[in-house]
Amino acid sequence: GNNAFVYGTLPVFIVRYLAEWSGQMGNLKLFGRQMSAVADLITILLLYLSANRLYGRRMALLAAAFSSLAVMQIQQSHFFTTDTFAVTFMTLAVYLAVEIVASPEAPEAEPGTTPNRSAFWRSILSDRLVWFSVLFGLAYGMAVASKGNAFPLALLLPLAFSIRYLKHKQVLSHRQTILIINALVVGGIFAI
């Protein structure tokens, strides 16, 4: 008699299809708990990678240790809830935002040279920041599909680009401006 389901359905579909594929449909409750634990382990790995990129190995190990001992994560992993999946996808989005901020700058074209139009767009589409944005959009979309309250995470993509270019540059080149606009649009499309 309820008209709404407050949790996202993506984790339910993931677990169901994995259970069918692996022949675990007879014990779906236990299989769902196992998948929650796997999602939590992936979250700890992503946290380690993010902290390692920003602060080094020692801090990353400390962050992963604290996360792995957190009572809430242990409890949520013990039960089949959508929260562990949402946190995994949200942590993946955060990791990708960290990569956007910390990735080295792609080389600019030599001054005075004007690349043709197709080479310009090919260089934009081959830029790793655009692909990080694509993956961010997918991770964000999966996070929202797992738990609706993940929607504010969308602000992280433009924030990551802002931090990246405020930290390194005063004035953006034409290529960088086009790259940022493309990356944000593509990230939004893939989130949908």
Image: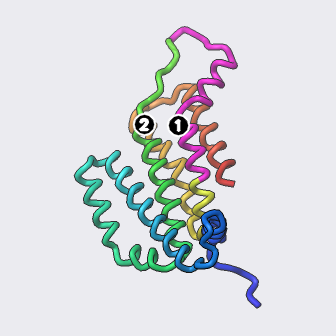
Q: Nearer the viewer, residue 109 or 34?
A: 34
Q: Do the CB atoms of the residues marked 2 and 1 lie less than 8 Å apart?
A: yes
Disc 1 marks which residue? Answer: 129
**Quadrant of the frame with the N terminus:** bottom right
Answer whether residue 130 is magenta in the image: yes
Q: Secondary structure at mark 2?
A: loop
The image quadrant of residue 22 is: bottom right
Residue 50, placed above or below residue 146: above
| Residue drawn where x is 50% and y is 42% of the image | 161
* Total number of numbered discs in the rendering: 2
Instruction: Please report the bounds of the magenta region as a residue range.
Output: 111-138
Q: Residues within 10 Å of mark 1 (few under 14, many from 20)?
A: many
Q: Position of residue 160 (x, y in %)?
A: 48, 46
Q: Residues within 10 Å of mark 2 (few under 14, many from 20)?
A: few
Q: Position of residue 155 (x, y in %)?
A: 55, 55
Q: Position of residue 9 (x, y in %)?
A: 66, 71
Instruction: Report the side of 57 relative to 164 (left or right).
Output: left
Disc 2 marks which residue? Answer: 103
Q: Is residue 41 visible?
A: yes
Seen as rendered, the residue at the extreme bottom is: 1
How does the figure colour the protein chain or chains? rainbow
What distance separates the C-alpha of mark 2 from that of mark 1?
A: 8 Å
